[in-house]
């Protein structure tokens, strides 16, 4: 019996060594593959630039793809070479590529290189690294317009840069990188007429999907949590804890349009939690107020961010993606224009 226990322990140790070695080999192979593709793209790019003719570039890529296909097989198509060229265009710095290749696979990188907005691309890189997204998850996040729905996208560029830098260098996650607007709740199956109780019940029935939409670091704590202040009882719709933010998160559900009186209700809940429920070493609780409609100018005038409140809309049925993308881009632009109105150009002759 004792010998069996010794062998069992030895087996687990050796198994761990083998798995660690396999992971290191996989990372090394993936890194070399990505660096190879970058070097190929860089070499082709230099050849094309030396000739300074666009038509020559198209011609040489096609010929080269045919030769490589003959020599090495179907993995070396013209499309693959264009991926290599785009890789160099998007990431011209070899040192950055060398680091990135050890963190993300070539399949991840292929999903990222079509993104033209550098801040948007950096957002997906850092979130992918932090949450260890699979390629499928990354693709899904991009397709669901995650960046445009995240609060950070409506902030000034310098703020976005600083938040992403803090995430990259210090693994520091800010609420603006977590909170979204709108939230996609189409998986709840709610259509036509439903009550707040129906909405809450549907969320709990689909809690796993709800957490996937809000973020994997949300941990469910309570439904209709009662808080007593004097002789009065109040009930928090949903209470979560966010592991990386180290905060309690209140989620209040509203069927209609956001109203300014909702602010005082949620502020009361947050102050109570901060005083009676927040544990030592944890951060101040935050609130998310989910509604079907809101006036962004009213939300900004109320300065809800100072109270730790994020107002967001939710969709139980999804509109066409292109329409939604256009609407979100317009919302981002309007938000930034309100924060930093453009100065009128002075066309007077001096």
Image (cartoon, rainbow, N blue to C red):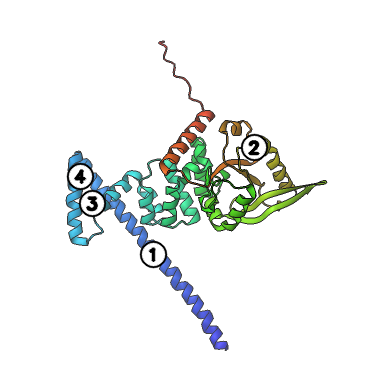
The residue that disc 4 covers is: 58
CB under 8 Å between discs 1 and 3? no
The x and y percentages for residue 327 are 46, 37
Disc 1 vs disc 3: which is toward the camera?
Answer: 3
Q: Secondary structure at mark 4?
A: helix
Give the residue at mark 1.
26
Q: Nearer the viewer, mark 4 or mark 1?
A: 4
* Label 3 sits on residue: 78
Return the disc, 3 or 4, that comes first in the chain's sequence.
Answer: 4
Q: Would you call the spot at circle 1 few (<14 residues within 10 Å), some (14-19), or many (20 or more)?
A: some
Q: What whole-number distance in Å separates the C-alpha atoms at marks 4 and 1?
A: 34 Å
Q: Nearer the viewer, mark 2 or mark 1?
A: 2
How far from the left and from the top, in percent, is residue 310? 60, 41
Which residue, as the protein is rendered here, is positioned at the far front?
A: 193
Q: Separation of disc 2 and disc 1 at Cα?
A: 46 Å
The label number, if any, that marks residue 306 in the structure image: 2
Sequence-first disc among 2 and 4: 4
Sequence-wise first label, 1 or 3: 1
Q: Is residue 252 visible?
A: yes
Q: Nearer the viewer, residue 122 or 322?
A: 322
């Amino acid at each position: 019996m004792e010998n069996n226990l010794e062998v069992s322990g030895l087996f687990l140790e050796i198994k761990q060594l083998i798995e660690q070695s396999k992971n290191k080999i996989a990372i090394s192979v993936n890194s070399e593959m990505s660096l190879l593709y970058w070097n190929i793209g860089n070499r082709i790019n230099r050849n094309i630039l030396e000739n300074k003719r666009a038509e020559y570039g198209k011609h040489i890529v096609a010929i080269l793809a045919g030769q490589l296909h003959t020599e090495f097989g179907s993995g070396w198509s013209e499309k693959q070479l264009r991926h290599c060229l785009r890789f160099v265009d998007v990431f011209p710095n070899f040192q950055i590529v060398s680091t990135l290749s050890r963190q993300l696979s070539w399949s991840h990188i292929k999903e990222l290189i079509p993104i033209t907005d550098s801040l948007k691309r950096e957002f997906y890189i850092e979130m992918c690294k932090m949450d260890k997204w699979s390629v499928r998850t990354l693709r899904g996040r991009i397709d669901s317009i995650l960046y445009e729905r995240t609060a950070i996208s409506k902030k000034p560029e310098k703020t976005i840069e600083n938040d992403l830098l803090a995430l990259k260098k210090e693994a520091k996650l800010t609420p603006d990188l977590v909170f979204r607007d709108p939230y996609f709740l189409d998986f709840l199956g709610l259509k036509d007429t439903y009550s707040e109780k129906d909405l809450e019940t549907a969320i709990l029935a689909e809690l796993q999907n709800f957490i996937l939409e809000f973020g994997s670091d949300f941990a469910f704590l309570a439904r209709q949590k009662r808080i007593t202040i004097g002789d009065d009882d109040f009930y928090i719709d949903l209470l979560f804890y966010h592991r990386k933010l180290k905060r309690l998160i209140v989620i209040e559900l509203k069927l209609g349009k956001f109203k300014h009186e909702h602010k005082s209700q949620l502020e009361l809940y947050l102050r109570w939690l901060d005083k009676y429920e927040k544990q030592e070493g944890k951060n101040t609780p935050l609130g998310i107020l989910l509604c079907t409609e809101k006036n962004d100018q009213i939300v900004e005038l109320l300065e809800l961010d100072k109270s730790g409140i994020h107002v967001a809309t939710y969709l139980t049925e999804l509109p066409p993606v292109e329409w939604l993308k256009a609407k979100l881009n317009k919302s981002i632009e309007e938000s930034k224009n309100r924060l930093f109105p453009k100065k009128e150009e002075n066309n007077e002759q001096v």
